[in-house]
Image (tube, rainbow, N blue to C red):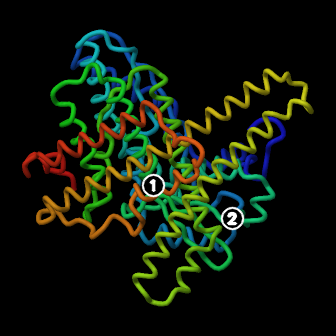
């Protein structure tokens, strides 16, 4: 944040470094890229090489029970939650490395360029699969190390909330933690005088993979081949099974290869993912700030009434998140437009204001994509359950929330007097996922289940 803006949480962006451990040393990075090039050139011969992007929130791990401000009660709650369903370091290491490292290329000019790009991504996948066990072994030597992306998202959100709002809502009572449970993306844990935001440890890598996949298909429409929808279904089916099936899904099946062209695609995927993670955190903070768990416990044992109330609480948490997002925009504008008190020209202040508005629009678009993804996973899970539920055990339902479409409709109420956010990418996403669902609906059972073979 710029200008006068700061609060308690902004200081932790710096001080957290002392509590973190690196996932890889510099020489290990060099070896990964050397080995990747070696394998790719054995497949396609010598030639051009990709550029590399590193999403730094996966470069470090830490014990979430050590991040301030935290109470002894929160530390004990974190330990209990982690002990109940431990995160395997081999799963965590693979997903962290896959989300950390991205390759991107110049726009392809020939079929050879496409094959070379694909060869490098296949080679990277092979190398990360080889490297992950040794990284996992090193991480296992430390107490409860988890990827930093959850804490970073928490700080991004809390850093946008004015101190007076933090005090009024008592948001300083809450902390975050990464957990293992495919049954949820995130959930809140409310105790007597504190609470925790729990995030699925695979959530950020899965979201980033979906964003990379969408951008890949969006930017390669002119190169579309006859197997385009088949490739899309093969990429999505394991993710759907991860959330819907009762058996554990191998994490290295959650990040299929999708070639990115142009550095802006890589940075766009990263930015969209951050917006989606932040909205999820804001949503869970809404549950905690509004005492939803306590209020739900006070309802008599009436299933129908509880379901209705739970749905209203989800709408309310979405509204809290959306309101918090707008509040962050207003706070940023307030800082950027204080040019009367600062040695800054009106033109410069206007430029900063427009940048804040564009950033807000990007975040809102990322949130809308999040609901499109949730709706896609919901519909595809229902399809798999209906068609192959006798062969694979699926959950009775994905969760107890209202449908993603219902939630998005409620959020659109916030745009009264405005058009709901849209963009070329959002419109493409709606049509693309509808086409993939239609394609999957028409498959015979053998083709439908093909991407799920050897999944568990």
Can residue 34 be seen in the rendering of this structure? yes
Residue 102 placement (x, y as % from top left): 42, 30
Foreground residue among 121 and 434: 434
Q: Tell me residue 415's x, y (percent).
A: 57, 47
Q: Which residue is mark 1?
A: 201
Q: Is residue 223 left or right of residue 59?
A: left
Residue appearing at x 25%, y 61% in the figure: 245
Q: Which element is circle 1 on? A: loop
Q: Residue at x 73, y 65 (%)?
A: 169
Location of residue 375 in the rendering, given as x and y in whole percent from the top left corner: 35, 52
Q: Is residue 409 above or below residue 216?
A: below
Residue 410 relative to residue 451: left or right: right
Vertical placement of residue 426 versus 374, above or below:
above
Q: Is residue 69 left or right of residue 224?
A: right
The 10 Å Cα crowd at callout 1, few under 14, some 14 to 19, many 20 or more, is: many
Which numbered circle lies on residue 243?
none
Mark toward the start of the polypeptide (2 vs 1): 2
**For the residue carrying disc 2, how many other residues have a C-alpha within 10 Å: few (<14), some (14-19), or many (20+)?**
some
Does 33 sit left or right of 109 as displayed? right
Q: Which mark is residue 70?
A: 2
Figure quadrant of residue 317: bottom right
Observer-nearest residue: 300 or 216? 300
Give me the residue at 57% from left, 49% from top: 278
Separation of residues labelled 2 and 1 (CA atoms):
20 Å
SS state under label 2? loop
Where's the C terminus, which quadrant? bottom left
Compared with residue 108, is residue 6 higher up or lower down, i.e. above or below?
below
């Amino acid at each position: 944040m710029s200008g006068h803006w700061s609060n308690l949480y902004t200081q932790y962006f710096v001080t957290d470094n002392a509590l973190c451990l690196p996932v890889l040393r510099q020489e290990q990075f060099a070896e990964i890229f050397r080995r990747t090039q070696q394998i790719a050139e054995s497949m396609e011969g010598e030639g051009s090489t990709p550029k590399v992007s590193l999403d730094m929130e996966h470069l470090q791990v830490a014990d979430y029970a050590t991040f301030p401000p935290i109470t002894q009660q929160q530390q004990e709650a974190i330990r209990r939650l982690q002990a109940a369903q431990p995160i395997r370091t081999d799963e965590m290491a693979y997903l962290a490395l896959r989300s950390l490292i991205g390759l991107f290329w110049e726009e392809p000019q020939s079929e050879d360029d496409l094959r070379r790009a694909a060869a490098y991504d296949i080679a990277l996948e092979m190398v990360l699969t080889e490297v992950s066990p040794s990284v996992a072994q090193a991480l296992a030597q430390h107490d409860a190390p988890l990827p930093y992306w959850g804490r970073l998202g928490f700080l991004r959100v809390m850093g946008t909330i004015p101190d007076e709002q933090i005090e009024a809502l008592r948001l300083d009572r809450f902390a975050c933690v990464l957990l293992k449970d495919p049954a949820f993306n995130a959930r809140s844990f409310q105790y007597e005088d504190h609470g925790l935001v729990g995030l699925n440890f695979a959530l950020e890598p899965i979201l980033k993979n979906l964003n990379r996949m969408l951008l890949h298909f969006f930017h390669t429409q002119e190169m579309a081949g006859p197997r385009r929808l088949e490739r899309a279904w093969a990429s999505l089916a394991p993710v759907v099974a991860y959330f819907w099936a009762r058996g554990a899904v191998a994490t290295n099946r959650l990040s299929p290869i999708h070639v990115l062209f142009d550095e802006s695609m890589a940075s766009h995927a990263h930015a969209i993912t951050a917006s989606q993670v932040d909205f999820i955190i804001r949503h869970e903070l809404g549950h905690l700030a509004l005492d939803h768990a306590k209020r739900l416990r006070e309802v008599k044992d009436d299933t129908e009434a509880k379901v209705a109330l739970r749905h209203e609480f989800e709408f309310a948490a979405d509204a809290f998140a959306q309101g918090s997002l707008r509040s962050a925009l207003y706070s940023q504008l307030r800082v950027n437009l204080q040019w009367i008190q600062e040695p800054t020209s009106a033109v410069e202040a206007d430029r900063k204001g427009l940048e804040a508005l564009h950033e807000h629009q990007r975040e809102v678009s990322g949130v809308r994509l999040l609901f499109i993804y949730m709706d896609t996973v919901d519909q595809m899970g229902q399809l798999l359950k209906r068609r192959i539920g006798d062969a694979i055990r699926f959950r009775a339902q994905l969760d107890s929330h209202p449908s993603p479409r219902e939630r998005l409709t409620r959020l659109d109420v916030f745009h009264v007097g405005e058009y709901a956010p849209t963009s070329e990418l959002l419109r493409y996403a709606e049509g693309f996922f509808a086409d993939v669902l239609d394609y999957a609906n028409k498959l015979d059972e053998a083709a439908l289940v093909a991407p799920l073979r050897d999944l568990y």
